[in-house]
Amino acid sequence: MKTDLNTNLRAIWGRAYVRVVGANRELSWLFFEVTLPLLAVFAFALIYRGLHAPEQYIGFVVVSGAMVAFWQNILWAMAAQFYWEKEMGNLELYLIAPVSRMAILLGMAVGGLFMTAIRAAAILIIGSWIFGVHYDVGSWLMLLVVFWVTMGALYGLGMLSSSLFMLYGREAWHTANLFQEPVYFISGFYFPVRSLGSGVAMAASLLPLTLGLDAIRQLLFSGGPVNPLLPVRTELVLLVIAMVLFNWAALKALTYMERLGKMTGRLTLKSQ
Amino acid sequence: MSEALEHSDAPSRLGPWLAAARLGWAIESNWADPFVFMTYQIVRPLFGALILVVMFKIVTGQPTSSAVFGQMYVGNAFFILVVQCVSCIGLVIFDDRERYQMLRYIYLAPIGLGAYLAARGMARLAATTVSILFTLAVGAWLFGLRYHLSPADLPYFSLILILGGIATLAMGIMLGGSTMLMAQNGWSMPEGVSGVLYLFCGAVFSIDILPWPFSAVARLIPWTYWLEGIRRSLLGSGYVASLAGLTNAQILLRLGIGTAGTVAVAWLTLRFAEYRAVATGKLDEKTDH
Amino acid sequence: MNWAIETQNLRRVFRGGTVRRLWRRKSAQNGNGETVALDAVDLQVKPGELFGLLGPNGAGKTTLLKILSTLLLPTSGTATVDGIDVAKDPERVRKRINMVSGGEHSGFGILTVRETIWMFAQFYGVPGRVVRERADRMMDILGLTEFAETKVSKLSTGTRQKMNIIRGFVSAPRILYLDEPTLGLDVAVAREVRSFVRAWVDEHPERSIILTTHYMAEADSLCDRVAIIDRGRVRACDTPANLKRDWAPECVYRIEIPLWTQGGHPLDDLDVVRSADVEHHGDRGRTNLRVILENGDGIGAVTERLSQRGVAALSVSRLEPTLEDAFLNLVGHGLAASEEKGR
């Protein structure tokens, strides 16, 4: 048991190392990962400015821009990574190793977290500075708790998705790509989700991103009208439930998909 | 004998070009499943437009049939072409070099990299036309937009579209060429560049609100005039107040000059990148990261 | 006896879809659109043994390795590794195995050779200090030391494969699977890899290696025992010497004739000829026939047939039997012919 834990911890560090080293050796990521997403945030902020929207909406866009970084890290640098690594030939080496698949995924996510955190911080700091966003934080502690619980739920969702990427490769990649804009839309990345109507917003709450963003906005802009979906405490409870459920489902799905892949022979089949 | 072979078996110039376009179609269309592909072509632009609709509604409270929304909507719909073509051509080199490992053979083939990239982009351009038409139709059907394209405007509109298409293909080729000198981790660059263009050409907001020097850049790039020309043709009026003094012909002229400039820069970039890639051995070097 | 590997009546069938499309050209396919990749495979590998699986492409070698490495489930039958059932307890199996494949492109171009070896060793819980010691020693043996700090993206095919070999060995597995490890390597690198593999088994008598190959000489020189596998079935399993003794025909001749351009070969309707491999050398204007005869008396009939057809026998020599002859005799065709059929 102790040996297994030790091996899994080593696996997390081993897989994270690639990303950490990559960030140091190829500094071009600073341009790709920071400058370009920042410009996208600028574009949406300028749309609001062009429409003479309240300044708070520009704040929403900046905060969303930072959160997008985490979401993209989970979806593309972790979940979809199983697809790429299958194509490279790494996946089968992970699968024959005596470690949990979740440890490998966690390694990818943790390794990417460094770059993601820098990207998110840059968007938040530079975006706030350029557009003069004013934050009014109600409770820092609550903000941190909500942020990390949202991350926990999102990583659970990402691991769940990775089981699909593991087996369905290219098809899963296309599906994830397909849902990029719909996810941005229904989770209210660029506007308060309640604007979609309570029914749609509640349905969108199945995505932890929706609740997380709404709660974080409420906590960051507590002084003004943010058109909240639910009270922060309720959202936090729902996020905790989502975190537990998604992580449990991910564990089950990874085991199930791996077994299904072994039965059908798709697990190591490339170029699908 | 050999001379006869050279003449009779020499491939036509069009043949390889069509083959590349067909390959582009097969790859882009998810290995020739037209239904999946069309869903893909429609869902993303549609939700992109919906985000815009909600943003507009919650801020202004105006109906979507208003003139300002029409300008935003049409700009956003046509900009899909830039996003899709630039991303597509920009990623061809990564795909062919890293994944399919075919770049070296394409380089050796008589088609030439520039024509190959353009042909791949043409396939996407054709498919994206469907996305644009669908988005415009949704605009008219759901959001009450009215288009005023008269037969008399058609030649002008066609010229605007053709020049914009050429400029977009050239931008894609420029990025495709640049990626020859990059490791695979630059995969997000083409999408990022289209994001930059989105910002500078005023796809959904007037470039007049851009601070200097961004506003100056906006006046240099052809897509600004492309979208202005499209808006004038389709909606009967332009969007950018500071360009209101320009006649349609002047818009066309500026677009033509911008397109020519983009083509020239793309050609130079591609030649330089090819030369550097061959000189440094990067042409078929699999970077794996 | 505790076998390192044991399979009993192992069968793997692929049904429909992409997998079928990939396999249908290479393996036996029945009328239901099913492809039988492995059929009734019974094998036992002893601890400390270097065991070869010899067969053409599509014979089922890689499928067998995938089952043994827990990447694929058998359709029926059982397979155990170190006494553990691969289908029932894959986690315990994984603690005992590792695998290296030929033409492998695993790893990350941005990492150095040393980092790559270290990273994969972490998945086996090997402490960094131990990885370093083992990797240094292995890199020294394989002549890889000067590339230790080179990025993987800069490596040649041979150097990269040496790194992969070390990646597989560094976790000190009880059982190591080598799936065509010398595929695409030049003669010198392939030889280095083979001697490294042989030395490792000799140094670690309790550990086993399963090697798949379609290089006859590799199986002959390297393996303690060899199973000849074709179209999913094990045709024979023994030491290379015994296989040659029991299955290789004694009457093998090489006959050189002027370049034969009429298709097939000039002896194709002769009863005494069991099989013949044809090699054309257009540059020299020669064709070499490697002929297996039913008995030693048949050579007279051969020369007579050649002269009847106006073909001069430029040279005739009798050959020592090889593993390839045994393979030919067992399977009914050579590796090249088998691959040709596969296409």
Image (cartoon, coloured by chain):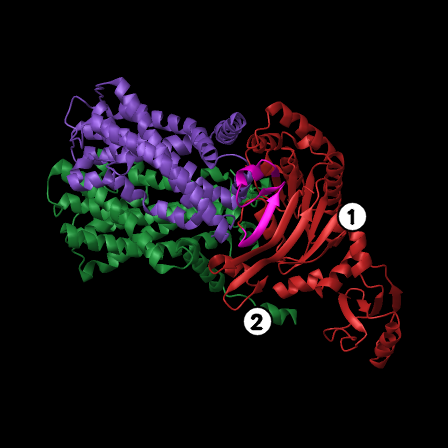
Chain colours: A purple, B green, C red
Region of the chain picked out in magenta, as a range = C74-97
Asked whether residue B238 is in view, the answer is no
Residue at which label 2 appears? B8
Residue A125 position in % (x across, y down):
31, 23
Q: Disc 2 on helix, strand or loop?
A: helix
C284 sits left or right of B121 in the view: right
**In which quarter of the view is residue C313 placed?**
bottom right
Foreground: A239 or B6?
A239
Per the model, the C-alpha gap separating discs 2 and 1 is: 52 Å
Q: Is residue C96 located in the magenta-colored stretch of the structure?
A: yes
Residue drawn at point x = 13 percent, y = 46 percent: B64
Q: Classify 10 Å Cα crowding around label 1: few (below 14), some (14-19), many (20 and above).
A: few
Q: Residue furthest front?
A: C1
Asked whether residue B262 is in view, the answer is yes
User: Numbered disc 1: what chain?
Assistant: C
Residue C324 position in % (x across, y down):
76, 58
Badge 1 amino acid: Ser
Residue B266 position in % (x across, y down):
43, 46
**In which quarter of the view is residue A254 placed?**
top left
Badge 2 amino acid: Ser
Q: Disc 1 on helix, strand or loop?
A: helix
A240 sits left or right of A260 in the view: left
Residue at which label 1 appears? C221
Against C11, residue C163 (above or below) is: above
Against B119, residue C257 (above or below) is: below
Against C321, residue A36 (above or below) is: above
Residue drawn at point x = 25 percent, y = 28 percent: A237
User: Numbered disc 2: what chain?
Assistant: B
Residue C239 position in % (x across, y down):
77, 51
